[in-house]
Image: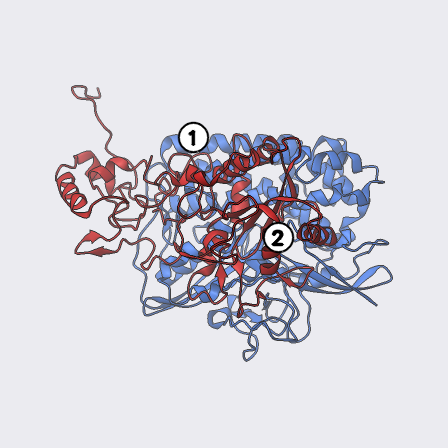
Chain colours: A blue, B red
Amino acid sequence: MNRMVVGPFNRVEGDLEVRIEHEDNAVTRAEVVTPLYRGFERMLLGKPPMDALVYAPRICGICSVSQSVAAAQALASAMNIRLPQNGELAVNLIHATENVADHLTHFYLFFMPDFARDTYQSEAWHPDIKTRFTAMKGTAPEDVLPARAQFMHIMGILAGKWPHTLSIQPGGSTRSVAPGEIARLDAILKAFRRFLERHLYGDRLERIVSLQCAQDLAAWSAERPPETCDFRRFLNVSAALELDRLGRSSGRFLSYGGYAMQGATLFRRGVFMTGNYAPFDARSVTEDTSSSWYKPGTGPEHPMTGTTDPDADRSEAYSWCKAPRLDGEIMEVGALARQLIDGNALIRDLVARKGGSVHTRIVARLLEIALVVMAMERWVAALQADGKYIVHEKIPASGEGIGLTEAARGSLGHWLSIENGRIANYQIIAPTTWNFSPRDGAGVAGPLELALVGAPIRPGETDPVSVQHIVRSFDPCMVCTVH
Amino acid sequence: MTDSARPVRLLWLQSGGCGGCSLSALGAESPDLLTVLEAANIEVLWHPALSEASGRDVVKLFEDLEDGRQTLDILCLEGSVMCGPNGTGRYHLFSGTGRPMMEWIRALAENAHHVVAVGSCAAFGGITAAGDNHTEAVGLSYDGRTSGGLLGADFRSRSGLPVINISGCPIHPGWLCETLHQIAMGRFSDAHLDEWARPLSYTMHLVHHGCARNEFYEYKASAEHLCDRGCMMENLGCKGTQARADCNMRVWNGAGSCLDGNYPCINCTAPEFEEPGHPFTQTPKVAGIPVGLPTDMPKAWFVALASLSKAATPHRLKENAVSDRLNVAPQDKGKVKP
């Protein structure tokens, strides 16, 4: 048995180290180390509750709006208010803009550049991928950055700026929209649709979301050569490298649904395991700190009464990340989980055949871009130039609230309690806290730690490329993980 | 940087921050970030969100830069320096090295021709230093309003300049792109820095400049709720008349600004903005008068002006100030809509 420390990682929105043990050119055990602690949960103690709306988005520069939405929902549930329809639509549009931009950033700037590495120079597909996806120098970043920036004009109109808006409030959005602005939003979406259809899909969004099974996807891919669009480019590389065998999911998935719609969510909330859907019960969430650098409590804690008391000297610990569990079990979160739980036929079929993997995580993410942009088109059409975008209520002197939403990379929850008009407790469980969880008290490893087992190591590799693919397939956000 | 043929070599580090300044920079337009770097002849040795290299290659690069085997023209830090617990820096051990990021930053800053703090965290400690700051988060050469920080008050990089503080939470992409470009062209000097070592190119202005609510401000027609179109200074905590930045003279994300989003300026380019001493969206007042008056304005004059202008506020502004949309339009005299 040999050991290897892999890191620093990059293109993971923060800092990450992975310690692996390997034998016979394959990983046998992994420990995922989140090396940065900033202490937002302590910072918020004693603050006026509404000030959470300034601090929470600044947990993360890439999931900033998701953090705002979770904080606003936690406050709204403590205040017991409902958003007016325009406010809900505006918040959803702001949130969807961030999530779609994040999917795009992940695919083009974070994930695909690893296939441009010289490691793959003998592969038939490599010259084209290198030209297209080389970090900072390929033709893809050149195409994507202006398209992404123009798409983000939606933020300029609806949210003032991105990241770190203060427009998202418990009662809705501060920014009402004028008739001319609704027309502009529609035009921006049209321009973005054109970019996606030309470069990413080489096809209509409607065609992409109509694919029903693995066979449909394969047939669609074979219609035209891989070089005709970036989705086909990925499918070609994925088939050649058998990415459907890499980074296997452990089989349990969680999604809070995301995008509130008059009491429901755009995507279904729940749990998916052993091939079946089950409802989600927020009372069953706990965090365990057996392998984390925090003073040991009395065992796993529910986040409403959870604590954050750092202790860098705990020798049995190896990460600042806590270990969240649902009913004591690990959960994988992200686009794959969301689409499985929502019942998307293509994703259900892919997972039924071969399980969750690097391949299915990427396909689910690319599929979701089309699904969400089409929802955004409907939401813009539903916006009214008159009617309220926000309602105002006083925050109670004491109370509790939970905010559950979906960032691009998975389920995000805020648990808030208020006493004497101040924040008495604030706990956050971010998507990558679930995915990159360390071991719990029972020694059960987190989703990434399990997904890495079996990853092949090429001769002479110090930073195995398979590990790079698996880690990034989760679209980690390390600054959210520990917060 | 005197040799125009040689690329200007830039290293970007991240520590106690959110990565939001990098993400904001990715939204640069006219032109985009990659084009700016090309125009400025900047070679990015490594950026944690954008570069291909990982692991051993990166550690080797850091070692070469520390030992002087490679030249470092510009060192950028995004995020606070994490000094805790108890000055050990163990709240951020840089992955793959087991060494506190605090030490890497110090070592690399010594060899850098220019050192740039990107965002208020790297400049002053910022949001990461909020609350009781139990993580001992500081900026490169400031700990809040106190000079010092990680590198000390007297720190000068090899160029002779102090740490250049491009503060903001987040930075506007233009502030970063233009400053880096000026540095790369060899046209950035001490004369371009303000009293907090921030680029004057954007701190020469107040957020108030170009604010679309200026007419409401002139007549003290104030917003009452977050969503109202009136001036947010009197009730909603807006610090635009004191905050140093050109946020309303250049657009954010192609269209907006905080003020255009109907929420107040929280003065995020200033040291210690993270602890305002009052709820962010409420204006502290003494005897009904806001405590924080516009920069440079004598109090008596402001009070006199305010009462005068309040008495003269036109109906249109009174109505629109407390509405979430502009309901009353200006009207040309003598012309009635048929």
Q: Is residue B164 left or right of residue B259?
A: right
Mark 2 and mark 1: span between their CA atoms?
A: 50 Å
Residue type at mark 2: give it: Leu
Closest to the observer, B116 or A144: B116
Closest to the observer, A296 or A92: A296
Callout 1: few (<14), some (14-19), or many (20+) C-alpha neighbours within 10 Å? few
Query: Is any part of residue B11 visible from this angle?
Result: yes
**Location of the N terminus of chain B (image quadrant):** top right
Query: Is any part of residue A346 visible from this angle?
Result: no
Name the secondary structure under disc 1: helix
The residue carrying mark 1 is: A183
The residue carrying mark 2 is: B108
Q: Disc 2 vs disc 1: which is toward the camera?
A: 2
Residue A316, image quadrant? bottom right
Q: Is residue B60 left or right of residue A96?
A: right
Q: Residue at x 85, y 59 (%)?
A: A25
Residue A216 higher or lower than B152, as above or below: above
Q: Is residue B211 left or right of residue A242?
A: left
Q: Residue at x 42, y 39 (%)?
A: B200
Q: Residue at x 75, y 41 (%)?
A: A116
Q: Is residue B209 left or right of residue A333?
A: left
Residue B6 higher or lower than B117, as above or below: above
Residue A251, image quadrant? bottom right
Residue B239, x across and y down, in percent: 32, 47
Are the residues flagged by discs 2 and 1 in contact, CB closer than 8 Å? no
Residue B179, x across and y down, in percent: 50, 38
